[in-house]
Image (cartoon, rainbow, N blue to C red):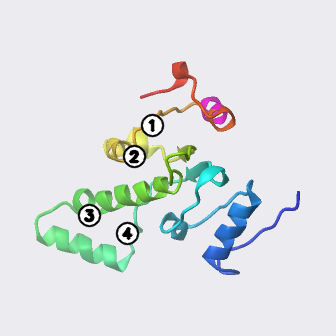
Amino acid sequence: DVYKRQLQGETSKGQILQQFIEAGNALLVATSSFWEGVDVRGDALSLVIIDKLPFTSPDDPLLKARMEDARHRGLDPFEDVQLPDAVITLKQGAGRLIRDVTDRGVLVICDQRLVSRPYGGLFLNSLPDAPRTRDLQVAEAFIRQGQLPAENAED
């Protein structure tokens, strides 16, 4: 196999996606710009890995303004602005994986806050109903065989 590396900025997002789909076995490591408007159906996309929960940088000017507005209205900036935005963004990222009724795949979220913070449940409950596991071997078996062993799946 020939390995071809394309970097964002060297070519268009559309061209990178087309090359990804045509390769059939490619790895696409992307920034948040690939969370929206990406439609890869079928086996070309079977694994989405999200390294951290998608909270907007606290230095973002629009976020700062929205948080200040929340404070003025007596709301909690984290609970009422940052958290809902991050939940919606995560749902969008997860939505890249399943685009059609015949699609299947594994969504890996590497951020420990899903299980260590009280708000982790909000993120988990926002995702489509699907088997969950923290066992890498179970996820690998699903990718290879297309099914999860029932005794290893977690709710």
Is residue 121 depicted above or below 38 in this figure?
A: above
Question: Which callout, 4 or 2, points to the residue nearer the camera?
Answer: 2
Element carrying mark 1: loop
Residue 124 found in image quarter: top left
Residue 155 position within the rendered picture, expressed as x and y whole percent measured from the top left = 41, 29
Give me the C-alpha separation between circle 4 and circle 2. 24 Å
Is residue 135 depicted above or below 82 in this figure?
A: above
- Extent of the magenta region: 136-141
Q: Earlier in the sequence, mark 4 or mark 2?
A: 4
Question: Looking at the picture, which amino acid does disc 1 mark?
Answer: Ala
For the view shown, which residue lies furthest in the right direction? 1
Q: Which residue in the structure is indicated by mark 1?
A: 130
Question: Which callout, 2 or 3, points to the residue nearer the camera?
Answer: 2
Question: Looking at the picture, which amino acid does disc 4 mark?
Answer: Pro
Question: Which callout, 1 or 3, points to the residue nearer the camera?
Answer: 1
Residue ID at (46%, 55%)? 95
Whether pointer 1 and pointer 2 mark residues with C-beta atoms closer than 8 Å, the reply is: yes
Residue ID at (50%, 26%)? 153
Question: Looking at the picture, which amino acid does disc 3 mark?
Answer: Val
Nearest to the observer: residue 2 or residue 80: 2
